[in-house]
Image: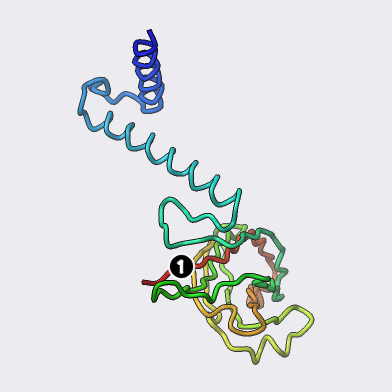
Amino acid sequence: DAKSLAVERNKELEAKVMELVPLDGDGDNDVPGSPHRKKAQRKSSIIGNMVVEEIGLTSNSTMKSSKDTNECKLWTKSSSMVVGAGNIESFVVELGQHDVLNTSGGAETVLLLRWRFDITPSDMDIEFSVLKGRCGNDDKSKQKTADCLIKKRTVVGGGGGEISGAFAIQNACTLLWSNAHSWIRPRTIKFTVEAVTVLSM
């Protein structure tokens, strides 16, 4: 009957989850309550949550993450660039048309810029800065005088973080990678930036 089929289906799914976790030396994965079985169950749960969050964030930017109902991702941008030896390269991040200043029930909406990037070769370093406003490669003098949220932070291999106040000037900010200290070797930067609103209670 339908109930029996459902039970069988659940057993099949559980068996497939268990196959994802390799047996240890004692072969105790099949023992109910064993640490390996619990590990498999946690993996299954985490995978399920990740799928829900990914669908929610990509299908509608106004949908809130199932992990944190106070957080909303406005957009994500990814790109890459080569920073030659002795050079400085920038990427201007513009907020765009988003209404993020509303308050609700005494709560305040905080706008965050999140970033992460990788450096190739991975054993090389680079100086990373975040500037307020638009300070592109065509305005080197403005890059020297702009307000800095992060100033010449040396990063090896890559890094990431988040900061508020990035869009306070011109609804934009500028990410800056400086390879000025290198005379020979260029760096390739692969990066992703996100604008996120968080409801602060």
Q: Which residue lies furthest to the front in this view?
A: 105
Q: Where is residue 109 in the image (x, y as percent from the top left)?
A: 47, 73
Residue 27 vs residue 6, the one in the foreground: 6
Q: Is mark 1 on a helix, strand or loop?
A: strand
- Determine crowd level at label 1: few under 14, some 14-19, many 20+ residues with C-alpha closer than 10 A: some
Q: What amino acid is labelled 1 in the image? A: Val
Horizontal and vertical percent for residue 140? 74, 85
Where's residue 37, x and y in %? 28, 28
Query: On the image, which quarter does residue 186 sit in?
Result: bottom right
Q: Residue at x 64, y 59 (%)?
A: 190
Q: Nearer the viewer, residue 192 or 41?
A: 41
In this view, the residue in front, 76 or 3, is 3
Where residue 8 sits: x, y (%)?
36, 13
The answer to whether 187 is drawn above or below residue 36 in the figure is: below
Determine the image quadrant of residue 142.
bottom right
Give the residue pinned by disc 1.
198
Q: Which image quarter holds the N terminus?
A: top left
- Looking at this view, name the residue that lies furthest to the bottom: 145
Q: Residue at x 55, y 80 (%)?
A: 152
At 63% across and 89% down in the image, what residue appears? Answer: 146
In the displayed image of the protein, which residue is found farthest to the right?
Answer: 138
Left or right, residue 91 beside residue 115: right
Which quadrant of the figure contains the C terminus? bottom left
